[in-house]
Image: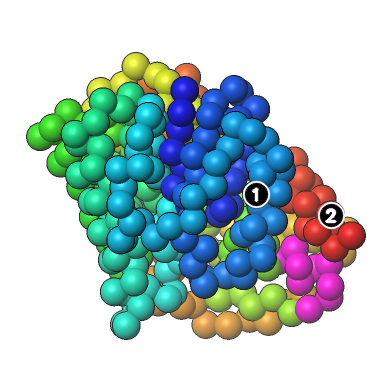
Amino acid sequence: MLALVTGVAGFIGSNLADRLVADGWQVRGVDRFTAYYEERAKRSNLVSLHANPSFELVEADLLSTDLGPLLDGVDVVFHQAGQPGVRLSWADGFRLYNEINVDVTQRLLEAVRYRSIKRFVYASSSSIYGNAASYPTMESDPPHPHSPYGVTKLAAELLCNAYASNFDVPVVSLRYFTVYGPRQRPDMAIHRMIEAAVHGTPFNVFGDGSHVRDFTYVGDVVQANVLAATGDLAPGAVMNIAGGASTTVSELLEAVGAAVGQPVPLIWQAAQPGDVERTGGSIERARTLLGWEPVTDLETGLARQVLWHRGRER
């Protein structure tokens, strides 16, 4: 089968593409190489893929490129591309978030509407829930985004649902909960914590350390994508993809220090607008519909990410 992976040079996209080619898929990856973080880091994510004849890279902007050639022969679209991060989505930053997260998704959905694809897997986010009323959060709980980023991810998910209900586009939305592991983006907390511990540089903690997150290992997220692409699912299905265990920021800092072998130097700062107090998702629906559940505990996942960080410095 031929897969189109958008955002293929990114954290999750590159890990997903690696898995797909290993499983015998043909993969066409597309990436714009935005300036959100260093292009060199993104290109390094693709080194092993370039050596594989089953992989093709297309450098293009999904806002403007002709989507026809990208979709020719494609069986499954894995839409991983997006503008990430909460704090830059305020003020003038919102326009870019809206373009990349909403407009690009609508263009892709409109293009696949006229094609016989088997599945369109959309990478949604736990940010659509905001500060939920109860935990673990269920897919039926009302969304209440706490940041403009969360608003754009919810808007794109609702577009997926609209195309599913009106045109039977075989969309599945996976709501990711704080993904970590090898190739994690440099702006993400665990990446910065590990770098701080390894190099003895300060890490800024926003808030008092009591914020709670549900961390999900990237390999488990990749497995969920593969199952979502091949399972028997109704158009418009939505599922939480969560790690299954909640951890406070303070507990995470201790776990990272243990994984590195030395503590994370800290600077305490005020909490930031848009940061929710807690995330935590029920995975019962994913377990029922996909037969999926996370298999990587935080200690194991952190150890693997630390190895990746140290390997980059050799």
Calculate the distance from the C-alpha at mark 2 to the C-alpha at mark 1.
Answer: 16 Å
Front label number (2 vs 1): 1
Which residue corresponds to the image point at 30% horizontal and 61% vertical from the top-left? 64
Q: Which residue is mark 1?
A: 46
Q: Main secondary structure of the magenta part?
A: helix
Q: Nearer the viewer, residue 12 or 247?
A: 12
Q: Is residue 312 visible?
A: yes
Q: Residue at x 66, y 42 (%)?
A: 49
In the picture, residue 19 is in which quadrant?
A: top right
Quarter of the image with the C terminus is bottom right
Q: For the residue carrying disc 1, how many other residues have a C-alpha within 10 Å: few (<14), some (14-19), or many (20+)?
A: many
Query: What amino acid is labelled 2 in the image?
Result: Gly
Residue in the image at 58% along x and 83% along y: 269
Q: Taking 289 as reference, is 105 left or right? A: left
Q: Nearer the viewer, residue 90 or 56?
A: 56
Instruction: From the top left corner, tell me how far across and down residue 113 is, in percent.
Output: 20, 36
Q: Secondary structure at mark 1?
A: loop
User: Contact (CB < 8 A) between labels 2 and 1?
Assistant: no
> Three-letter amino acid code at disc 1?
Leu
Residue 215 seen in the figure: no
* Protein image colouring: rainbow
> Where residue 273 sits in the image (x, y, percent)?
40, 77
Q: In the orientation shown, which residue stands out farthest toward the left? A: 166
Q: Which residue is mark 2?
A: 311
